[in-house]
C-alpha cells in the first residue's frame, strides 16, 4: 500500500480542520447529483478555495485561509470521501498535500503521526 502514498507534494496546505470541513460541506450542496464532486484550488497567495457547480443547483465557492507551501494547484475529489477523512482527525489543524489533479491527495493531522488519509481524484 505504501507505493501509492506520495512521498513528497508539490503543494501542502496547513488549514484549520473545522473551517475546511465547513467549506467542503457548503460547496458540496452544489455538487453534481451522484458524483458529489468539489474542486479544491490551493493558492500560496490566497489560501484554499472549494467550489462546486451543477447546472440544476447552481454554483458555490467557499474560501478559507491556509498556510500554503509550494505552487498553485487544483484537484477535484468526491466530497463525501474527503469529509470522512477530515472528520476522523481530532486535531485543530490538518495538512492537505497535493501533487496534481491526476494523483491522490493526502490528509493528515498537523501535530500527530500515524494517521494518513488518501483521497483519489475525480478526473474531469
Image (cartoon, rainbow, N blue to C red):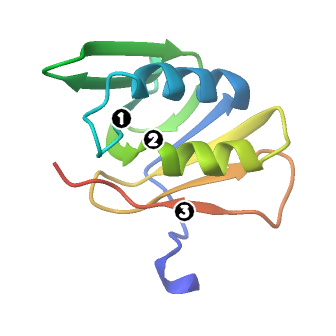
**Closer to us: 122 or 94:** 122
Secondary element under disc 2, as helix, strand or loop, is helix
Q: Quadrant of residue 68?
A: top right
Q: Which residue is mark 3?
A: 118
- Percent of width and height locating residue 64: 55, 16
How many other residues sit within 10 Å of disc 2, few (<14), some (14-19) or many (≥20)? many
Q: Nearer the viewer, mark 1 or mark 3?
A: 1
Task: Identify whether 57 is placed above or below 87.
Answer: above
- Percent of width and height locating residue 119: 48, 58
**Residue at position x 75%, y 50% from top?**
88
Secondary element under disc 1, as helix, strand or loop, is strand
Q: Which residue is mark 2?
A: 79
Q: Is residue 115 left or right of residue 27?
A: right
Q: Which residue is mark 1?
A: 38
Secondary element under disc 3, as helix, strand or loop, is strand
Q: Is residue 91 left or right of residue 18?
A: right
Q: How many marks?
A: 3
How many other residues sit within 10 Å of disc 1, few (<14), some (14-19) or many (≥20)? many
**Residue at position x 47%, y 14% from top?**
63
Q: Earlier in the sequence, mark 2 or mark 3?
A: 2
Q: Earlier in the sequence, mark 1 or mark 2?
A: 1
Tag 1 near tag 3, CB within 8 Å: no
Q: Nearer the viewer, mark 2 or mark 3?
A: 2
Q: Earlier in the sequence, mark 1 or mark 3?
A: 1
Residue 77 - label:
none
> How far is disc 1 from disc 3 in space, using C-alphas?
16 Å
Amino acid at each position: 500500500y505504501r507505493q501509492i502514498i506520495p512521498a513528497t507534494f508539490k503543494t501542502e496546505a496547513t488549514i484549520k480542520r473545522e473551517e475546511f470541513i465547513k467549506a467542503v460541506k457548503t460547496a458540496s450542496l452544489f455538487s453534481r447529483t451522484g458524483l458529489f464532486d468539489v474542486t479544491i484550488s490551493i493558492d500560496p497567495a490566497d489560501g484554499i478555495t472549494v467550489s462546486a457547480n451543477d447546472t440544476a443547483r447552481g454554483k458555490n465557492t467557499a474560501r478559507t485561509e491556509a498556510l500554503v507551501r509550494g505552487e498553485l494547484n487544483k484537484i477535484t475529489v468526491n466530497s463525501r470521501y474527503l469529509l470522512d477523512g477530515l472528520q476522523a482527525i481530532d486535531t485543530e489543524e490538518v495538512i492537505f498535500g497535493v501533487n496534481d489533479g491526476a494523483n491522490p491527495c493526502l490528509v493528515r493531522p498537523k501535530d500527530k503521526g500515524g494517521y494518513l488519509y488518501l483521497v483519489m481524484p475525480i478526473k474531469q
